[in-house]
Image (cartoon, rainbow, N blue to C red):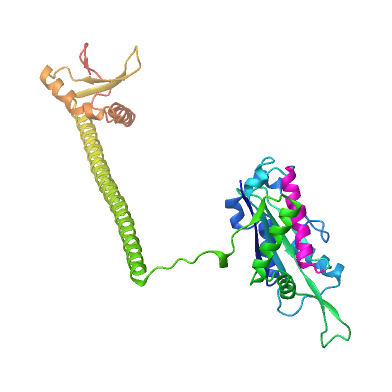
Amino acid sequence: MTHFTCVRVERIRDRSELARIASHGLRLDPSSKERVDPARTPLNRSGSDYAENPLDLSTALEGFLKSTGARLYGRAPIGLHILVSVSPGWITEAGELHDPQNTRNVQLAHQAVDWVQRALGGGRPCVVAWRQDLDEKGGGVVDIVAAPTRTAKLNRFKEDVTIVSVTAALEVHRALHPNDPTAFGALQTSWAVHAAKTLDRALCRGTRKIDQPARHLDPKRYGRLVDAARDEAKAIAAQDLAEERAVLDARERRLEIAEEKITRFVAGMAAEREGIMAEARAKVDDALNAIAIGIDALTDGRIVAVEPCAESGELLLIADMNLDAAERSALWEAITPGLPAGLKTVLGYIQAEAARSGEARNGDHARHPSPSHF
């Protein structure tokens, strides 16, 4: 099976871009939370000769500058972010893709760093730090931060000074590969040659863009394709809009139904409350009316006494024996609603007060030997 090599290069224009790269390496950026498996993050490999923590790129760069005596020059890029890779399938031929002990992972990291140093160092140190992420879905990639340097004669310095110079290093390397018109194409070729020599001669470079046949469309066919794509996009958008409207309509209808239920519930609760209040008012009116009738009956002699029952202690209303059965029944029916409201207690209290004041109609409570009681 054919496996390929690849190089991606980005200029690091300032320290903020360096901090962004470091943030990803430290798994602090938002994209890391979506792309990585935190359980495998401790397996990641990294290294630097200029910082205890290779992922602290700011410290590593400062250590590199101090060690090499190099300076950052004006607004020129401060380094290169180089992603050196091979096909993941080449790694898995020797073991698991994310295994830090897989010999091909180890070899890849070692040779990627060695190649960057050889290709861009010009005999001087240039690799600031490297890392090999083993917690992402893919693999076979080594991230390298490099700061190629050169000596330069600057007006403000009497002697030559060493400065970080990305462009000069890329141009020097490109001159070594005349078949590649760009510096980045030259890096692709250079890494492919180095990988084939040090890792596996089966590794090869991908096809150059300039060697790929161009594909052209005549204006009419191109126009038809554009129109078809536009129509398809409109149809998809219309379908999406219709679906969204259907969802919104359904949601609005559910809200209307819920509002109707709430309105009916509130109205029902209000009616029920009014009914309860009306019933309570009626019971209170009936009780008060019954108590008034009882007081009248005690006053006019239809009820002659209020005495406790010898057995139960419950208060008994003693009716006048001269009342016939119909009169007693009518009187009992009239005063019954007042019983739960304490009618007997009220009449007993009135009787006691009348007895104490000497106003009782019959002071000795003389009554028929067999009085009737309720």
> Is residue 46 visible to the viewer in this orientation of the structure?
no
Please identify the quadrant where the N terminus is shown: top right
Q: How many marks?
A: 0
Q: Position of residue 14 (x, y in %)?
A: 69, 72
Give the left or right position of residue 83, taking residue 125 as reference: left
137 to 21, vertically: above or below: above
113 inside magenta stretch: yes
> Is residue 6 visible to the viewer in this orientation of the structure?
yes
11 inside magenta stretch: no
The residue nearer to you, when weighing 124 against 195, is 195
What segment carries the magenta color? 102-122
The residue nearer to you, when weighing 127 against 361, is 127
Please identify the quadrant where the C terminus is shown: top left
Q: Position of residue 347 (x, y in %)?
A: 28, 28
Give the left or right position of residue 342, taking residue 29 as reference: left
The residue nearer to you, when weighing 190 against 38, is 190
Q: Position of residue 173 (x, y in %)?
A: 73, 70
- Residue drawn where x is 13% and y is 24% of the image: 330
The quarter of the displayed image where residue 6 is located: bottom right
Q: Position of residue 167 (x, y in %)?
A: 71, 75
- Residue drawn where x is 31% and y is 59% of the image: 235
The quarter of the displayed image where residue 355 is located: top left
The residue nearer to you, when weighing 297 against 152, is 152
For the stretch drawn in magenta, what is the main secondary structure? helix
Q: Residue furthest bottom?
A: 155
